[in-house]
Amino acid sequence: MTPTSTRSFWLRRLHSLSGVFPIGAFLLEHMFTNSFILQGPEAYNEKIEFLRHLPYVAVLEIVFIGLPILYHAGYGIYVWMTGKVNLRWYPYAQNWLYVLQRWTGVMALVYIGVHVYETRIVNALYGTEVSFARMQEIVSQPQMFWFYVIGLLAVCFHFANGLWGFCVSWGMTIGPKSQRAAGIFSGILGLTIFGAGLNALIYLIQ
Amino acid sequence: MPKMDFIQVKVKRQANPRLKPYWEEYRVKYRPYMNIITVLQELRKNPHTFDNRPSSVIAWEASCLEEVCGTCTMVINGRVRQACSALVDQLGESITIEPMTKFPVVRDLVVDRSVIFRSLKRLKTWVPVDGTHALGPGPKMGPDEALERYEMSKCIACGCCMEVCPQINERSEFVGAAAINQVRLFNSHPTGKVIERERLKALMEKGGIEDCGNAQNCVKACPKEIPLVTSIADVNRQMTLNLLDLLKK
């Protein structure tokens, strides 16, 4: 057991790790699965059915998605409260990213909350079928479409910038050169998954 | 060089730690090549406000006057820096001077930065060699390594990195970049290395390295241009490599 005085270290490291694995890994899987939308309703619905009937699906949902997101969000809000923005006098790019990471975290939490309610909780409560048609119904409302686009952008930014921060926090990128390289990599990865998600959203409303 | 006859100076005053701070405005006759120290010296000669009311002498500290001691660190026109190297010709004719905000104010522009010393003691940032008896020559260090460590050793404990850190405030006990950099300095010393685990463990306690939010303002604010972000990331790597051992009590 660890002494209580080092608890915040382990909780913070767990927060950092949970953002990449499993949450980040799930995000990549999710954006990839979403892309089956491009192959039409049948292909997409088939993937949903496949995922819904995975063995131990409830355990997978709770242990690898639900709990990590709740922990990451809860501890993230605590981390956010311990900071104090000082962009006015120190408006450096990296300081902006620090602030944006906090803002997009809150935005992502709101977005994920609504998204999970609409696509998972309604199913559990009222048995609403989650399908291509259901997604089409949701995002064909203009305000929901834009809510999804902004939410997706917040999630992708938070993931990409978080991945970059993860590399620093775990000591993988130490000097300015490797940090810049990791920044470029994270940026491209973030833009790629944003592009994939956006493409699926646009396909749904066409 | 800007043309001006007088400089408008606003100073945040505070008589003692318990009293409320207040602003006082002054007017100082301009001379070429003035820095904030000479401005404060002028105000000491003639402690009168801009409308000629008598004012008390402003308390401030300075020592080396060449940006190597860190004593005269204060917030000038919103940004933290050393008063001795803050040139009036670059600041303009309207200047605000405040004490640092992350350390308790003693009086006017004088702050108590002893928290840095307390952190260094807690993190054992020294080479643990006891006694006065001869121990023989120490291990050798290559020139590349010496050069790298020299950069880290330039810290003057001025507190600029802590002042600009969004993670240091009344809601957080974060130790700050300067102290973490010292851990890297002494963990990379061939003899200092023997207690590296003790330093890493101390850095795991509340307010330790995990509170770094990666805003990276520290490295921009450091007057000695110490690669502070690199130091924090390097100590993060030491944490990761020792993770399993650090799990033990």
Image (spheres, rainbow, N blue to C red):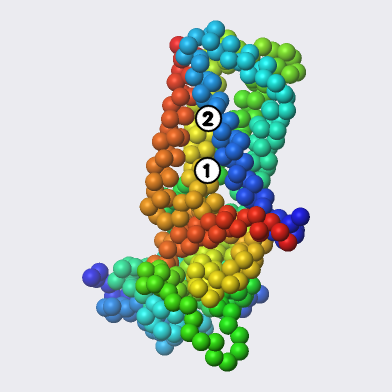
Question: Could you tell me the amino acid type at mark 1?
Answer: Gly
Which residue appears farthest toward the bottom when viewing the image?
B133
> Is B55 or B218 nearer to us in this picture?
B218
Q: Does residue B98 appear anywhere in the picture? A: no
In percent of width and height, residue A99 lies at 51, 47
Q: Badge 2 is on which residue? A: A28
Q: Is the C terminus of chain B in the top left, top right, bottom left or bottom right quadrant?
A: bottom right
In percent of width and height, residue B148 lies at 40, 68
| Position of residue B196 in the picture relative to residue B228 (left or right) | right
Q: Residue at x 65, y 21 (%)?
A: A118
Residue B133 drawn above or below residue B24? below
Indicate the chain on which mark 2 is placed: A
Which residue appears farthest toward the top when viewing the image?
A42
Residue B228 drawn above or below residue A92? below
> Is A185 or B130 nearer to us in this picture?
B130
Q: What is the crowding at mark 1: few (fewer than 14 residues within 10 Å), some, or many (at least 20)? A: many
Q: Residue at x 38, y 52 (%)?
A: A177
- Counting residues from the N terminus, which is met first, the one under dot 1 or under dot 2? 2
Which residue appears farthest toward the front when viewing the image?
B136
Question: Could you tell me the amino acid type at mark 2?
Answer: Leu
| Position of residue B128 in the picture relative to residue A100 (left or right) | right
Q: Which mark is residue A162?
A: 1
Report the number of numbered marks: 2
Label 1 sits on a secondary structure element that is helix
| Position of residue A14 in the picture relative to residue A186 (left or right) | right
> Is B43 or A175 nearer to us in this picture?
A175
Q: What is the crowding at mark 2: few (fewer than 14 residues within 10 Å), some, or many (at least 20)? A: some
